[in-house]
Amino acid sequence: MHGRIACDGGGAQGLQQQIRPGGCVAGDRRLGEIEFLMHQYNDAAAEFGLAVRRWRLLDPHDDLDTWRTELDRGAALLAAGRTSEATQLLRPLDLLGTQGYAYQNSLPNRQGASAALPFAAVSYYACEQLADYERESGSVRAAVEDYATALDWTPRIRQGSGVRPEVADNNAALGYLRLGDTSTATGLESKALAADPADPVFLMSAGFIADRAGQVAEAARTTAR
């Protein structure tokens, strides 16, 4: 989910009680985030949908905030099992984010280049969400294509963006492994481990990939770390 929130001591329910429904666009989105944390995914999707509509009514030129909120709605729809709605929402965001990045980056000033980065993140997160869903639902070839598109952005947006491409590297590696491509899977998992050598999920994946590649000793060494 784009823009994850961390609840303090009051918890999600405490935060929910502090926000008046319909008070403002930011409040609608905040309520959606809280509903998501409380696993009320249909309610979260509804709040995000309302926020999208109100963003457009408030400022019809504010594409970035609208698309960011649509990413959140897509995550909620996927979590609620409304996958058809989610994919129809998320797929266009890849192209829209790409076009927004290209336009902002073409402006003849340094501010335009800086403003382009959030649009790249829209495309990244849309592709990552789609790829995760596709991999889990068995559409592995579609998943690795979307992971590749997401990871193509990482040299541009990684620094200071909050994006963790090592997660996509790990998930893409598992996708390639399911396709029988242990060489590509090994390379991607090596990148994930280089970013976070102590991550237990990455270590487990690396061991599994090594085992499937016939590298039994390496598999045992990795899983023992």
Image (cartoon, rainbow, N blue to C red):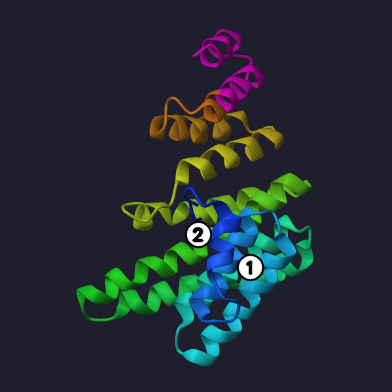
Span shown in magenta: 204-225
- Identify the secondary structure beneath mark 1: helix
The residue beneath circle 1 is 73
Q: Classify 207 as above or below 74.
A: above
Q: Classify 142 as above or below 54.
A: above
Q: Quadrant of the N terminus?
A: bottom right
Closer to us: mark 2 or mark 1?
A: 1
Q: Classify 63 as above or below 185.
A: below
Gap between marks 2 and 1, in whole Å?
16 Å
Other residues around mark 1 within 10 Å, as few (<14) / some (14–19) / many (≥20): many
Q: In which quarter of the view is residue 146 placed?
A: bottom right
The answer to which of 99 and 24 lies nearer the viewer is 24
Name the main secondary structure of what is drawn in magenta: helix
The disc label shown at residue 124, or none: 2
The answer to which of 113 and 148 lies nearer the viewer is 113
Which residue occupies 56% across, 29% down?
A: 201
Per the image, is 214 magenta? yes
Which residue occupies 58% across, 64% down?
A: 16
Which residue occupies 77% across, 46% down?
A: 138
The answer to which of 1 and 22 lies nearer the viewer is 22
Per the image, is 219 magenta? yes
Q: Amino acid at mark 1?
A: Arg
Answer yes or no: do the residues labelled 2 and 1 have beta carbons within 8 Å?
Answer: no
